[in-house]
Image (cartoon, rainbow, N blue to C red):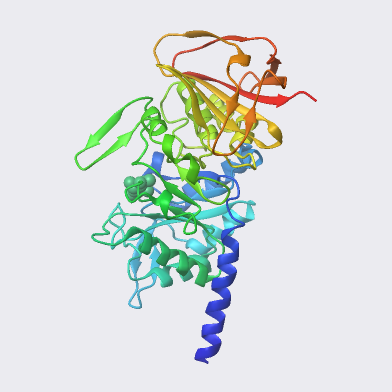
Amino acid sequence: MKKILLAAITLASLYGFSQKFDLAKTPPMGWNSWNTFACNINEDLIRKTADAMVATGMKDAGYVYINLDDCWHGERDSQGFIHEDAIRFPSGMKALADYVHSKGLKIGIYSDAGSQTCGGKPGSRGHEYQDAITYAYWGIDYLKYDWCSTGELNAAEAYKTMRDAIYAAGRPMVFSICEWGQNKPWTWAKDVGHLWRTTGDIHNCWDCEMGFGTWSKLGVLSILDKQAELRKYAGPGHWNDPDMLEVGNGMSLTEDRAHFSLWCMLAAPLIAGNDIRNMSKETLEILTNKEAIAINQDELGVQCYKMFDRGDFEIYAKPLSHNELALCFLNRGETPYPFEFNWKYYPVFDGISGKSYDFEKTEFNIRDCWQKKDTGTTTVPLKATVQPHDVILLRLSPRK
Ligand code: GLA
């Protein structure tokens, strides 16, 4: 009997292991409850969010995961199995997962490597295999795994334990590592998780840092600047995660557009963090801009780099498949930035991906991804103005 059990677990682990490589070949896309709802979540919110994901066209634009963050938890039972909060989730997590699946979507859940989650709920420490089996039984497709109350735990080992527990449970799950970049996960997590947070939590501001004693929340530009050295670690199946989106959560329209464009350029997971049941037309237009999303989801999986820096004016380049290239002209500052960009002086060579673009040798068509129109070619200098806290996002395609 023991042998059969062991063989079953080994087979399940091998199956899980093989799945590692098929999940998240492009950055995961979905929604997460935390940025807007924090601990105020319940099954009605999750069901309605799944409905909205379909009804708004977000699903068609590529969003798949409906992720519950902290505070779905009830207590562990006498055998140590975790249960959902029976008041907030009266139908149970399995029924909720079935509902989300019935919409053609996938469902994610949240736990923590320590004894308690950041919201003070039961963590998975010492219960990793039990929790993974429970999630698999419920039909969970994605696990975000946090780092509160971890004491002296070794991060790489703790995340490997949960990874192995997921493999053993035998259900493919995207594994999202959330230890805020404290233990340099980019150096050890490629074969552990599919994405790893690179910083502390995001805040819905353009350029701010909000201190809370031992930790701080970071605005869009602070997070952007912390990604520069990390691009070489990202690629299909393993992504840097600069945290979830704040689009629709209070920044201006241009800031939201710039934030979204930059996350697309960074090959970041696109996890919406707003109330999608109830969002403005402008917010929806940003979140579902298929041209920006195509840059994010490009199969080459290369994270952008800063190719030009003149104070508040910066240009980011992201090599794409089929010799295409995405460029993002960013104005960090408070006044409009008019510029003239003479392509022939700025060949693009990316040492990381090995991709090069010589505008003297090859002519490219230019597509403006927010204006959604073709705006010319690289044979003449680009003259434009980037508005304050805004971007111009271009896709360049070689002329046949
Ligand atoms: C941490 C994470 C957040 C969120 C909260 C939940 O702060 O970084 O993304 O999951 O915990 O408590």
Percent x, y of residue 52: 57, 41
Percent x, y of residue 230: 44, 41
Q: Residue furthest bottom?
A: 1
Name which quarter of the figure residue 364 lies in.
top right
Could one spot residue 39 in this view of the protein?
no
Q: Is residue 314 above or below residue 223?
A: above
Describe residue 161's horizontal placement relative to residue 217 as left or right.
right
Name which quarter of the figure residue 389 lies in.
top left
**Residue appearing at x 59%, y 70% in the figure:** 15
**Residue appearing at x 39%, y 72% in the figure:** 81
Percent x, y of residue 271: 50, 42
Q: Is residue 41 above or below residue 257?
A: below
Camera-side residue of 254 and 12 = 12
Q: Residue furthest right?
A: 400
Q: Is residue 247 above or below residue 170?
A: above
**Residue appearing at x 32%, y 77% in the figure:** 78
